[in-house]
Image (cartoon, rainbow, N blue to C red):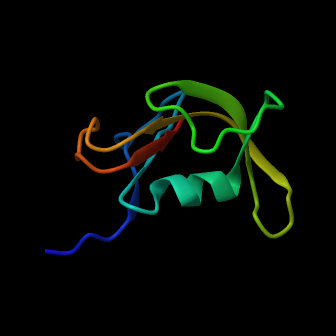
Amino acid sequence: MGYDTVAAIATPLGSGGIGIIRISGKEALGITQAIFRPSCRKIFDPYPSHRFFHGWIRDPKSGMILDEVLMVYMQAPRSYTREDVAEIH
């Protein structure tokens, strides 16, 4: 059995106001930290578990803002998969 980090769309097909991307696995927090910038100026390392943060998703190469989002990090084993999980809403 593998222990890869997986990112997937977590919302169903169809129209909706909010989409969710779920990242699950050992690299979930690292991937999220590379693309998410919180609107508060405080630096979190690591992000507190089970708290939502407002911010922006940025392209890691250009720094361009791609979308305004909410992000929540759930530290293992207190998640659906019992792995580290980050969700981008």
Q: How many marks overall? A: 0
| Residue at x 56%, y 59% (from the top left corner) | 30
Residue 5 location in percent, x, y?
A: 38, 65
Left or right of 6 in this view: 1:
left
Q: Which quadrant, please, contains the C terminus?
A: top right
Question: Who is closer to the viewer here, 61 or 18?
Answer: 61
Quarter of the view holding residue 38: top right
Residue 17 picture quarter:
top right
Q: Position of residue 4 (x, y in %)?
A: 32, 71
Question: Where is the N terminus found, in terms of image quarters?
Answer: bottom left
In the rendered view, would you say 53 is above or below 9? above
Q: Residue at x 62, y 28 (%)?
A: 53
| Image coords of residue 9 (percent x, y) | 41, 50
Res 11 → quadrant: top left
Q: Looking at the picture, how far across and down is residue 24, in whole percent?
A: 36, 54
Q: Residue at x 79, y 30 (%)?
A: 39
- What residue is at 47 percent from the left and 40 percent from the top? 20
Front position in the image: 72 or 48? 48
